[in-house]
Image (spheres, grey):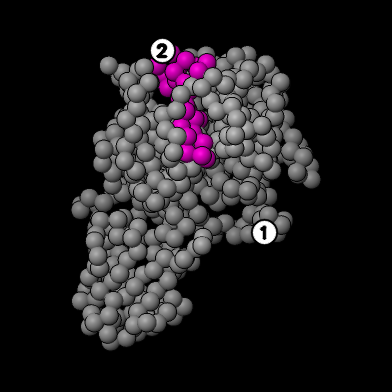
Amino acid sequence: MIRVQLPYHLRTLAKVEGEVEVEVEGVVTQRSILDALESKYPVLRGTIRNHGSVDRRPWLRFFACGQDLSHDPPGTVLPEAVANGTEPFIVLGAIAGG
Amino acid sequence: MSGVRVLIGTRKGAFIATSDEKREKWDISEPLFAGWEMYHLKGSPVDPDRIYASQSSGWFGQVIQRSDDGGKTWATPGSKPEDLVSPQGWPQGESNKFVYDGTPGTHQWYDGTQHPWEFKRVWHLEPSLSDPDTVYAGVEDAAMFKSTDAGKTWKELSGLRCHESGPKWQPGAGGMCLHTILIDPANHNRMFIAISAAGAFRTDDGGETWKPINRGLKSQFMPDPEAETGHCVHRIAFHPSKPDTLFMQKHWDVMRSDDAGDNWHEVSGNLPTDFGFPIDVHAHEPETIYVVPIKSDSEHFPIDGKLQVWRSRTGGNEWEALTKGLPQGNCYVNVLRDCMAVDTLDSCGVYFGTTGGQVFVSADSGDSWSAIAEHLPAVTSVEVQTLS
Protein backbone atom coordinates (compact mmCIF):
# COMPACT_ATOMS: atom_id res chain seq x y z
CA MET A 1 0.00 0.00 0.00
CA ILE A 2 1.40 3.38 -1.06
CA ARG A 3 0.61 6.45 1.05
CA VAL A 4 0.04 9.71 -0.81
CA GLN A 5 -0.28 13.16 0.72
CA LEU A 6 -2.25 15.65 -1.34
CA PRO A 7 -2.55 19.43 -0.93
CA TYR A 8 -5.75 20.80 0.61
CA HIS A 9 -7.49 21.77 -2.62
CA LEU A 10 -6.95 18.38 -4.20
CA ARG A 11 -8.25 16.65 -1.07
CA THR A 12 -11.44 18.70 -1.25
CA LEU A 13 -11.75 18.04 -4.96
CA ALA A 14 -11.35 14.29 -4.44
CA LYS A 15 -13.57 14.44 -1.34
CA VAL A 16 -10.98 12.77 0.88
CA GLU A 17 -9.48 13.62 4.24
CA GLY A 18 -5.91 13.03 5.31
CA GLU A 19 -3.61 10.74 3.37
CA VAL A 20 -4.91 8.51 0.62
CA GLU A 21 -3.71 5.02 -0.11
CA VAL A 22 -3.26 3.42 -3.50
CA GLU A 23 -2.16 0.02 -4.69
CA VAL A 24 0.62 -0.18 -7.25
CA GLU A 25 1.42 -3.39 -9.05
CA GLY A 26 5.01 -3.78 -10.14
CA VAL A 27 7.70 -1.13 -9.93
CA VAL A 28 6.85 1.90 -7.78
CA THR A 29 7.61 5.11 -9.62
CA GLN A 30 6.13 8.61 -9.80
CA ARG A 31 4.31 7.52 -12.92
CA SER A 32 2.85 4.32 -11.46
CA ILE A 33 1.75 6.07 -8.26
CA LEU A 34 0.07 8.89 -10.17
CA ASP A 35 -1.53 6.43 -12.60
CA ALA A 36 -2.98 4.55 -9.63
CA LEU A 37 -4.05 7.76 -7.93
CA GLU A 38 -5.86 9.04 -11.03
CA SER A 39 -7.46 5.64 -11.56
CA LYS A 40 -8.87 5.68 -8.04
CA TYR A 41 -9.79 9.40 -8.13
CA PRO A 42 -10.46 10.31 -11.78
CA VAL A 43 -11.38 13.87 -10.76
CA LEU A 44 -7.64 14.41 -10.21
CA ARG A 45 -6.79 13.74 -13.84
CA GLY A 46 -5.31 16.91 -15.29
CA THR A 47 -4.82 18.55 -11.89
CA ILE A 48 -1.38 17.12 -11.09
CA ARG A 49 -0.20 16.21 -14.59
CA ASN A 50 -1.34 18.00 -17.71
CA HIS A 51 -3.71 16.19 -20.02
CA GLY A 52 -1.98 15.04 -23.15
CA SER A 53 1.66 15.56 -22.20
CA VAL A 54 1.18 14.10 -18.66
CA ASP A 55 3.93 16.49 -17.58
CA ARG A 56 3.94 17.60 -13.94
CA ARG A 57 2.07 20.89 -13.63
CA PRO A 58 4.68 23.59 -13.10
CA TRP A 59 3.48 24.83 -9.70
CA LEU A 60 3.50 21.38 -8.11
CA ARG A 61 6.38 19.50 -6.51
CA PHE A 62 6.89 15.87 -5.57
CA PHE A 63 8.72 14.98 -2.35
CA ALA A 64 9.50 11.73 -0.52
CA CYS A 65 11.95 10.68 2.17
CA GLY A 66 13.14 14.26 2.55
CA GLN A 67 14.10 14.47 -1.12
CA ASP A 68 12.77 16.70 -3.90
CA LEU A 69 11.82 14.29 -6.68
CA SER A 70 10.13 16.88 -8.87
CA HIS A 71 12.73 16.83 -11.59
CA ASP A 72 13.45 13.10 -11.60
CA PRO A 73 12.29 11.23 -14.68
CA PRO A 74 8.77 9.92 -13.95
CA GLY A 75 9.92 6.34 -14.47
CA THR A 76 12.61 6.51 -11.78
CA VAL A 77 12.22 3.82 -9.14
CA LEU A 78 11.22 5.38 -5.81
CA PRO A 79 12.82 4.49 -2.45
CA GLU A 80 11.75 1.26 -0.79
CA ALA A 81 10.32 3.29 2.11
CA VAL A 82 7.72 4.71 -0.26
CA ALA A 83 7.02 1.34 -1.84
CA ASN A 84 6.41 -0.33 1.52
CA GLY A 85 4.35 2.52 2.93
CA THR A 86 6.79 3.64 5.59
CA GLU A 87 7.10 7.07 4.00
CA PRO A 88 4.44 8.95 2.01
CA PHE A 89 4.73 10.24 -1.51
CA ILE A 90 3.99 13.96 -1.16
CA VAL A 91 2.34 16.17 -3.79
CA LEU A 92 2.92 19.74 -2.73
CA GLY A 93 1.82 23.07 -4.12
CA ALA A 94 4.74 25.43 -4.64
CA ILE A 95 4.71 28.50 -2.45
CA ALA A 96 3.81 31.55 -4.52
CA GLY A 97 2.71 35.06 -3.74
CA GLY A 98 4.65 35.70 -0.52
CA MET B 1 -43.91 33.65 -6.77
CA SER B 2 -41.08 34.74 -9.03
CA GLY B 3 -37.59 35.58 -7.95
CA VAL B 4 -33.98 35.72 -8.99
CA ARG B 5 -30.86 33.69 -8.43
CA VAL B 6 -27.57 35.56 -8.85
CA LEU B 7 -24.50 33.47 -9.65
CA ILE B 8 -21.36 35.23 -8.46
CA GLY B 9 -17.86 34.11 -9.37
CA THR B 10 -14.93 35.49 -7.37
CA ARG B 11 -11.18 35.05 -7.05
CA LYS B 12 -11.71 32.85 -4.01
CA GLY B 13 -14.89 30.88 -4.61
CA ALA B 14 -18.45 31.26 -5.82
CA PHE B 15 -21.57 32.54 -4.11
CA ILE B 16 -25.26 32.27 -4.92
CA ALA B 17 -27.58 35.10 -3.88
CA THR B 18 -31.35 34.68 -4.04
CA SER B 19 -34.26 37.05 -3.59
CA ASP B 20 -37.91 37.46 -4.46
CA GLU B 21 -39.11 39.78 -7.20
CA LYS B 22 -38.70 42.83 -4.95
CA ARG B 23 -34.93 42.23 -4.90
CA GLU B 24 -34.58 43.94 -1.53
CA LYS B 25 -33.69 41.11 0.85
CA TRP B 26 -31.03 38.63 -0.14
CA ASP B 27 -29.90 35.25 1.03
CA ILE B 28 -26.25 34.59 0.23
CA SER B 29 -24.81 31.08 0.22
CA GLU B 30 -21.68 29.95 1.96
CA PRO B 31 -18.63 30.00 -0.32
CA LEU B 32 -18.71 27.31 -2.99
CA PHE B 33 -15.35 25.88 -4.13
CA ALA B 34 -13.68 28.05 -1.52
CA GLY B 35 -10.22 29.23 -2.39
CA TRP B 36 -10.53 28.51 -6.13
CA GLU B 37 -10.81 31.11 -8.87
CA MET B 38 -14.33 30.95 -10.25
CA TYR B 39 -14.18 32.71 -13.60
CA HIS B 40 -17.79 32.06 -14.58
CA LEU B 41 -21.02 30.30 -13.64
CA LYS B 42 -24.05 30.22 -15.89
CA GLY B 43 -27.39 28.42 -15.89
CA SER B 44 -29.10 26.73 -18.81
CA PRO B 45 -31.97 28.78 -20.24
CA VAL B 46 -33.75 25.49 -20.93
CA ASP B 47 -33.36 24.02 -17.45
CA PRO B 48 -32.57 26.65 -14.79
CA ASP B 49 -31.54 23.95 -12.31
CA ARG B 50 -28.67 23.03 -14.62
CA ILE B 51 -25.73 25.31 -13.84
CA TYR B 52 -22.21 25.06 -15.19
CA ALA B 53 -19.20 26.52 -13.39
CA SER B 54 -15.57 27.10 -14.31
CA GLN B 55 -13.23 26.45 -11.39
CA SER B 56 -9.50 26.97 -11.82
CA SER B 57 -6.20 27.45 -10.09
CA GLY B 58 -2.67 28.19 -11.15
CA TRP B 59 -1.57 25.11 -9.24
CA PHE B 60 -4.17 22.55 -10.26
CA GLY B 61 -5.48 23.84 -13.56
CA GLN B 62 -9.04 23.70 -14.84
CA VAL B 63 -12.02 21.94 -13.27
CA ILE B 64 -15.58 22.00 -14.57
CA GLN B 65 -18.40 21.73 -12.05
CA ARG B 66 -22.08 21.12 -12.74
CA SER B 67 -25.19 21.38 -10.62
CA ASP B 68 -28.48 19.76 -11.57
CA ASP B 69 -30.46 21.17 -8.65
CA GLY B 70 -30.05 24.91 -8.90
CA GLY B 71 -26.73 25.09 -7.11
CA LYS B 72 -27.57 23.05 -4.01
CA THR B 73 -25.15 20.27 -4.92
CA TRP B 74 -22.28 20.11 -7.38
CA ALA B 75 -20.17 17.45 -9.08
CA THR B 76 -17.56 17.25 -11.78
CA PRO B 77 -19.43 15.99 -14.86
CA GLY B 78 -18.93 12.33 -15.54
CA SER B 79 -18.14 11.44 -11.95
CA LYS B 80 -20.95 8.95 -11.44
CA PRO B 81 -19.60 5.42 -11.05
CA GLU B 82 -21.03 4.30 -14.40
CA ASP B 83 -19.30 7.20 -16.12
CA LEU B 84 -15.87 6.49 -14.77
CA VAL B 85 -14.89 3.50 -16.83
CA SER B 86 -14.78 3.59 -20.59
CA PRO B 87 -15.66 0.58 -22.78
CA GLN B 88 -11.91 -0.05 -22.91
CA GLY B 89 -11.76 -0.21 -19.14
CA TRP B 90 -9.83 3.04 -18.66
CA PRO B 91 -10.91 5.65 -16.15
CA GLN B 92 -12.60 8.66 -17.68
CA GLY B 93 -12.58 11.86 -15.62
CA GLU B 94 -12.24 14.00 -18.73
CA SER B 95 -14.49 16.91 -17.83
CA ASN B 96 -11.40 19.10 -17.47
CA LYS B 97 -9.67 17.81 -20.60
CA PHE B 98 -9.38 20.81 -22.90
CA VAL B 99 -6.90 19.75 -25.54
CA TYR B 100 -6.48 21.69 -28.76
CA ASP B 101 -7.05 19.86 -32.02
CA GLY B 102 -3.90 18.72 -33.74
CA THR B 103 -0.66 20.62 -33.34
CA PRO B 104 -1.70 23.92 -31.77
CA GLY B 105 0.86 26.16 -33.50
CA THR B 106 1.73 29.65 -32.34
CA HIS B 107 0.25 33.09 -31.86
CA GLN B 108 1.82 36.50 -31.32
CA TRP B 109 3.34 37.16 -27.89
CA TYR B 110 3.56 40.49 -26.09
CA ASP B 111 6.93 41.28 -27.66
CA GLY B 112 5.81 40.44 -31.18
CA THR B 113 7.47 37.03 -31.32
CA GLN B 114 5.52 33.83 -31.87
CA HIS B 115 4.49 31.81 -28.80
CA PRO B 116 2.96 28.33 -28.53
CA TRP B 117 -0.77 28.07 -27.91
CA GLU B 118 -1.18 26.90 -24.28
CA PHE B 119 -4.48 26.11 -22.57
CA LYS B 120 -4.81 27.93 -19.24
CA ARG B 121 -8.45 28.17 -18.16
CA VAL B 122 -12.09 28.50 -19.13
CA TRP B 123 -13.20 32.13 -19.01
CA HIS B 124 -16.80 31.77 -20.10
CA LEU B 125 -19.42 29.03 -20.28
CA GLU B 126 -22.41 29.54 -22.55
CA PRO B 127 -25.16 26.91 -22.29
CA SER B 128 -27.14 26.13 -25.43
CA LEU B 129 -30.48 27.85 -25.91
CA SER B 130 -32.19 24.54 -26.74
CA ASP B 131 -30.37 21.64 -25.07
CA PRO B 132 -29.29 21.63 -21.41
CA ASP B 133 -26.58 19.06 -22.19
CA THR B 134 -24.89 21.26 -24.76
CA VAL B 135 -22.58 24.00 -23.56
CA TYR B 136 -19.83 26.08 -25.13
CA ALA B 137 -16.61 27.15 -23.41
CA GLY B 138 -14.45 30.13 -24.25
CA VAL B 139 -10.91 29.54 -23.09
CA GLU B 140 -7.45 31.07 -22.70
CA ASP B 141 -5.36 30.76 -24.91
CA ALA B 142 -8.22 31.75 -27.13
CA ALA B 143 -10.29 28.91 -28.49
CA MET B 144 -13.82 27.62 -28.30
CA PHE B 145 -14.83 24.18 -27.06
CA LYS B 146 -18.19 22.42 -27.13
CA SER B 147 -19.65 19.69 -24.95
CA THR B 148 -22.77 17.79 -25.94
CA ASP B 149 -22.80 15.50 -22.90
CA ALA B 150 -23.34 18.02 -20.12
CA GLY B 151 -19.66 18.76 -19.65
CA LYS B 152 -18.29 15.21 -19.44
CA THR B 153 -16.13 15.64 -22.54
CA TRP B 154 -15.10 18.60 -24.66
CA LYS B 155 -14.18 19.02 -28.30
CA GLU B 156 -12.57 22.07 -29.80
CA LEU B 157 -14.34 23.99 -32.56
CA SER B 158 -10.95 24.46 -34.12
CA GLY B 159 -12.12 26.40 -37.15
CA LEU B 160 -11.86 29.48 -34.97
CA ARG B 161 -8.32 29.06 -33.64
CA CYS B 162 -7.16 27.83 -37.04
CA HIS B 163 -8.46 30.94 -38.78
CA GLU B 164 -5.72 32.34 -41.00
CA SER B 165 -5.39 35.34 -38.70
CA GLY B 166 -4.62 33.14 -35.65
CA PRO B 167 -0.83 33.66 -35.68
CA LYS B 168 -1.49 37.42 -35.41
CA TRP B 169 -3.67 37.21 -32.30
CA GLN B 170 -2.03 38.50 -29.15
CA PRO B 171 -2.82 38.47 -25.44
CA GLY B 172 -4.18 41.49 -23.62
CA ALA B 173 -3.09 42.24 -20.08
CA GLY B 174 -5.44 39.56 -18.77
CA GLY B 175 -4.22 36.91 -21.17
CA MET B 176 -5.43 35.85 -24.61
CA CYS B 177 -8.94 34.96 -23.62
CA LEU B 178 -12.14 34.13 -25.44
CA HIS B 179 -14.51 35.82 -23.01
CA THR B 180 -17.79 36.41 -24.82
CA ILE B 181 -20.12 33.95 -26.54
CA LEU B 182 -23.49 35.09 -27.87
CA ILE B 183 -25.90 32.64 -29.52
CA ASP B 184 -28.46 34.11 -31.92
CA PRO B 185 -31.89 33.08 -30.57
CA ALA B 186 -33.34 33.09 -34.10
CA ASN B 187 -30.59 30.97 -35.62
CA HIS B 188 -28.57 28.85 -33.23
CA ASN B 189 -25.94 28.23 -35.89
CA ARG B 190 -25.05 31.91 -35.74
CA MET B 191 -22.80 32.82 -32.84
CA PHE B 192 -20.69 35.82 -31.99
CA ILE B 193 -17.52 35.61 -29.92
CA ALA B 194 -14.91 38.09 -28.76
CA ILE B 195 -11.25 37.66 -27.92
CA SER B 196 -8.77 39.95 -26.22
CA ALA B 197 -6.84 40.87 -28.26
CA ALA B 198 -7.98 39.47 -31.56
CA GLY B 199 -11.41 41.06 -31.91
CA ALA B 200 -14.91 39.83 -32.66
CA PHE B 201 -15.77 36.88 -34.87
CA ARG B 202 -19.02 35.39 -36.20
CA THR B 203 -19.96 31.91 -37.30
CA ASP B 204 -23.02 31.12 -39.38
CA ASP B 205 -22.55 27.35 -39.44
CA GLY B 206 -22.50 26.36 -35.78
CA GLY B 207 -18.81 26.99 -35.24
CA GLU B 208 -17.23 25.25 -38.21
CA THR B 209 -16.03 28.43 -39.88
CA TRP B 210 -15.55 31.94 -38.55
CA LYS B 211 -15.33 35.43 -39.98
CA PRO B 212 -13.65 38.41 -38.31
CA ILE B 213 -16.19 41.19 -37.80
CA ASN B 214 -14.12 44.20 -36.86
CA ARG B 215 -14.65 46.70 -39.68
CA GLY B 216 -14.96 50.15 -38.17
CA LEU B 217 -12.90 49.45 -35.06
CA LYS B 218 -9.84 51.62 -34.53
CA SER B 219 -7.10 50.65 -32.06
CA GLN B 220 -4.18 53.02 -31.80
CA PHE B 221 -1.91 50.44 -30.15
CA MET B 222 -1.72 48.50 -33.43
CA PRO B 223 0.61 49.32 -36.34
CA ASP B 224 -2.50 49.42 -38.53
CA PRO B 225 -5.24 50.79 -36.26
CA GLU B 226 -7.95 49.48 -38.59
CA ALA B 227 -6.55 46.00 -39.18
CA GLU B 228 -8.97 43.12 -39.68
CA THR B 229 -7.94 41.51 -36.37
CA GLY B 230 -5.90 42.37 -33.27
CA HIS B 231 -8.44 44.61 -31.52
CA CYS B 232 -8.90 44.36 -27.77
CA VAL B 233 -12.64 43.83 -27.58
CA HIS B 234 -13.70 43.73 -23.95
CA ARG B 235 -17.32 42.67 -24.33
CA ILE B 236 -20.19 42.48 -26.78
CA ALA B 237 -23.91 42.25 -26.04
CA PHE B 238 -27.24 42.19 -27.84
CA HIS B 239 -30.93 42.11 -27.11
CA PRO B 240 -32.41 38.68 -27.93
CA SER B 241 -35.13 40.28 -30.06
CA LYS B 242 -32.59 42.20 -32.18
CA PRO B 243 -29.57 39.92 -32.56
CA ASP B 244 -28.24 41.84 -35.56
CA THR B 245 -27.75 44.90 -33.39
CA LEU B 246 -24.57 44.43 -31.38
CA PHE B 247 -23.07 46.68 -28.76
CA MET B 248 -19.38 46.56 -27.89
CA GLN B 249 -17.22 47.87 -25.10
CA LYS B 250 -13.80 47.94 -26.70
CA HIS B 251 -10.59 48.64 -24.77
CA TRP B 252 -11.32 52.26 -25.64
CA ASP B 253 -14.57 53.18 -27.45
CA VAL B 254 -18.16 51.99 -27.15
CA MET B 255 -19.29 50.70 -30.53
CA ARG B 256 -22.48 49.63 -32.27
CA SER B 257 -23.28 47.45 -35.26
CA ASP B 258 -26.65 47.08 -36.96
CA ASP B 259 -25.62 44.40 -39.45
CA ALA B 260 -24.50 41.51 -37.25
CA GLY B 261 -21.02 42.90 -36.84
CA ASP B 262 -20.16 43.52 -40.48
CA ASN B 263 -19.74 47.24 -39.79
CA TRP B 264 -19.28 49.15 -36.53
CA HIS B 265 -19.54 52.80 -35.59
CA GLU B 266 -18.69 54.57 -32.37
CA VAL B 267 -21.46 55.55 -29.94
CA SER B 268 -19.34 56.74 -27.00
CA GLY B 269 -21.03 60.16 -27.24
CA ASN B 270 -20.88 62.10 -23.97
CA LEU B 271 -19.37 59.36 -21.80
CA PRO B 272 -16.76 60.82 -19.41
CA THR B 273 -14.35 58.09 -20.56
CA ASP B 274 -15.03 55.36 -23.09
CA PHE B 275 -12.67 52.85 -21.51
CA GLY B 276 -14.37 50.06 -19.61
CA PHE B 277 -15.10 46.37 -19.56
CA PRO B 278 -18.77 45.26 -19.36
CA ILE B 279 -21.70 46.29 -21.52
CA ASP B 280 -25.24 44.99 -21.32
CA VAL B 281 -28.72 45.58 -22.72
CA HIS B 282 -32.00 46.16 -20.87
CA ALA B 283 -34.23 43.07 -20.88
CA HIS B 284 -37.27 44.84 -22.38
CA GLU B 285 -35.81 47.88 -24.15
CA PRO B 286 -33.43 46.88 -26.96
CA GLU B 287 -32.05 50.42 -27.26
CA THR B 288 -31.28 50.82 -23.55
CA ILE B 289 -27.68 49.88 -22.77
CA TYR B 290 -25.37 50.10 -19.78
CA VAL B 291 -21.62 50.57 -19.34
CA VAL B 292 -19.32 51.33 -16.41
CA PRO B 293 -16.79 54.00 -17.45
CA ILE B 294 -13.31 53.40 -16.07
CA LYS B 295 -10.71 56.16 -15.98
CA SER B 296 -8.12 54.58 -18.25
CA ASP B 297 -6.24 51.45 -19.17
CA SER B 298 -3.48 52.56 -16.82
CA GLU B 299 -5.80 53.38 -13.91
CA HIS B 300 -8.41 50.68 -13.65
CA PHE B 301 -10.83 52.55 -11.39
CA PRO B 302 -13.68 55.03 -11.77
CA ILE B 303 -13.00 58.72 -12.34
CA ASP B 304 -12.58 60.63 -9.05
CA GLY B 305 -13.40 57.50 -7.05
CA LYS B 306 -17.09 57.78 -8.00
CA LEU B 307 -18.63 54.49 -9.07
CA GLN B 308 -21.14 55.20 -11.83
CA VAL B 309 -23.12 53.14 -14.28
CA TRP B 310 -23.95 55.08 -17.43
CA ARG B 311 -27.13 54.34 -19.35
CA SER B 312 -28.14 55.22 -22.86
CA ARG B 313 -31.80 54.92 -23.85
CA THR B 314 -31.02 55.77 -27.45
CA GLY B 315 -28.74 52.88 -28.33
CA GLY B 316 -25.66 54.97 -27.61
CA ASN B 317 -24.31 58.50 -28.10
CA GLU B 318 -26.56 60.08 -25.43
CA TRP B 319 -25.67 58.83 -21.98
CA GLU B 320 -26.72 59.61 -18.41
CA ALA B 321 -24.92 58.83 -15.17
CA LEU B 322 -26.68 56.52 -12.70
CA THR B 323 -25.35 57.18 -9.22
CA LYS B 324 -28.16 56.83 -6.68
CA GLY B 325 -27.07 54.26 -4.12
CA LEU B 326 -23.56 53.80 -5.54
CA PRO B 327 -20.45 55.00 -3.67
CA GLN B 328 -19.59 58.51 -4.84
CA GLY B 329 -16.26 58.90 -3.17
CA ASN B 330 -13.10 56.95 -2.37
CA CYS B 331 -14.18 54.02 -4.53
CA TYR B 332 -11.28 52.65 -6.55
CA VAL B 333 -12.56 49.33 -7.83
CA ASN B 334 -12.88 47.89 -11.30
CA VAL B 335 -15.82 46.11 -12.91
CA LEU B 336 -14.63 43.20 -15.03
CA ARG B 337 -16.09 42.20 -18.38
CA ASP B 338 -18.30 39.30 -17.27
CA CYS B 339 -19.58 41.13 -14.20
CA MET B 340 -22.82 42.71 -15.44
CA ALA B 341 -26.17 41.02 -16.02
CA VAL B 342 -29.88 41.79 -16.30
CA ASP B 343 -32.92 39.86 -15.14
CA THR B 344 -36.18 39.62 -17.08
CA LEU B 345 -38.67 40.60 -14.39
CA ASP B 346 -41.25 43.20 -15.42
CA SER B 347 -39.16 45.91 -13.82
CA CYS B 348 -35.80 44.98 -15.28
CA GLY B 349 -33.08 44.35 -12.73
CA VAL B 350 -29.48 45.27 -13.47
CA TYR B 351 -26.58 43.71 -11.57
CA PHE B 352 -22.84 44.21 -11.44
CA GLY B 353 -19.92 43.13 -9.29
CA THR B 354 -16.61 44.83 -8.53
CA THR B 355 -13.03 43.86 -7.83
CA GLY B 356 -13.66 45.25 -4.34
CA GLY B 357 -16.09 42.44 -3.60
CA GLN B 358 -19.27 44.46 -3.98
CA VAL B 359 -22.33 43.22 -5.87
CA PHE B 360 -24.92 45.87 -6.66
CA VAL B 361 -28.48 45.51 -7.91
CA SER B 362 -30.94 47.96 -9.36
CA ALA B 363 -34.54 46.76 -9.46
CA ASP B 364 -35.63 49.78 -11.48
CA SER B 365 -33.53 49.63 -14.64
CA GLY B 366 -30.64 51.50 -13.05
CA ASP B 367 -32.41 54.47 -11.46
CA SER B 368 -31.35 53.39 -7.97
CA TRP B 369 -28.94 50.84 -6.59
CA SER B 370 -28.34 48.84 -3.44
CA ALA B 371 -25.71 46.35 -2.37
CA ILE B 372 -26.42 42.64 -2.35
CA ALA B 373 -22.98 42.06 -0.81
CA GLU B 374 -20.09 44.37 -0.03
CA HIS B 375 -17.26 42.25 1.25
CA LEU B 376 -16.80 39.30 -1.07
CA PRO B 377 -13.49 38.44 -2.73
CA ALA B 378 -12.85 40.24 -6.03
CA VAL B 379 -15.80 39.51 -8.31
CA THR B 380 -14.96 37.91 -11.65
CA SER B 381 -18.45 37.20 -13.00
CA VAL B 382 -22.10 37.92 -12.35
CA GLU B 383 -25.00 36.11 -13.98
CA VAL B 384 -28.66 36.19 -13.01
CA GLN B 385 -31.43 33.66 -13.47
CA THR B 386 -35.03 34.81 -13.41
CA LEU B 387 -37.07 32.12 -11.72
CA SER B 388 -40.81 31.65 -12.05
**What secondary structure prevails in the magenta region?**
loop
Query: What is the quadrant of the N terminus of chain B in the image?
Result: top left
**Residue B346 numbered mark, or none:** 2
Picture coordinates of residue A37, whole percent (x, y): 28, 67
Determine the CA span between mark 1 and mark 2.
50 Å
Q: Is residue B112 left or right of residue B136?
A: right
Q: Which residue is the site of mark 1?
A: B114
Q: Residue at x 41, y 12 (%)?
A: B346
Amino acid type indicated by mark 2: Asp
Q: Which residues are magenta?
A: B340-368
x and y, in percent, of residue B381 in the image: 47, 37
In this view, A18 is above or below B339:
below
**Do the dots labelled 1 and 2 sit on one chain?**
yes
Q: Considering only vertical position in the picture, is A23 above or below A41?
A: below
What's the residue at 30%, 60% (across, down)?
Answer: A11
Give percent across and percent down for residue B220: 77, 40
Q: Nearer the viewer, mark 1 or mark 2?
A: 2
Badge 1 amino acid: Gln
- Kindly identify the residue that appears in the image at 61 percent across and 46 percent down: B163
* Disc on the earlier residue, 1 or 2: 1
* B324, B225: nearer the viewer: B324
Please name whichever residue, A94 or B107, is drawn nearer the observer in this view of the structure: A94
Count neighbours of disc 1 (C-alpha within 10 A) and say few if under 14, some if 14 to 19, many if 20 or more.
some
Q: Is residue B104 magenta?
A: no
Say what secondary structure mark 1 lies in: strand
Q: Is residue B136 left or right of residue B256?
A: left
Q: Which of the 4 image quarters holds residue B273?
A: top right
Numbered disc total: 2
Compared to residue B63, the image places residue B279 above or below, namely above
Asked whether B184 or B254 is in front, the reply is B254
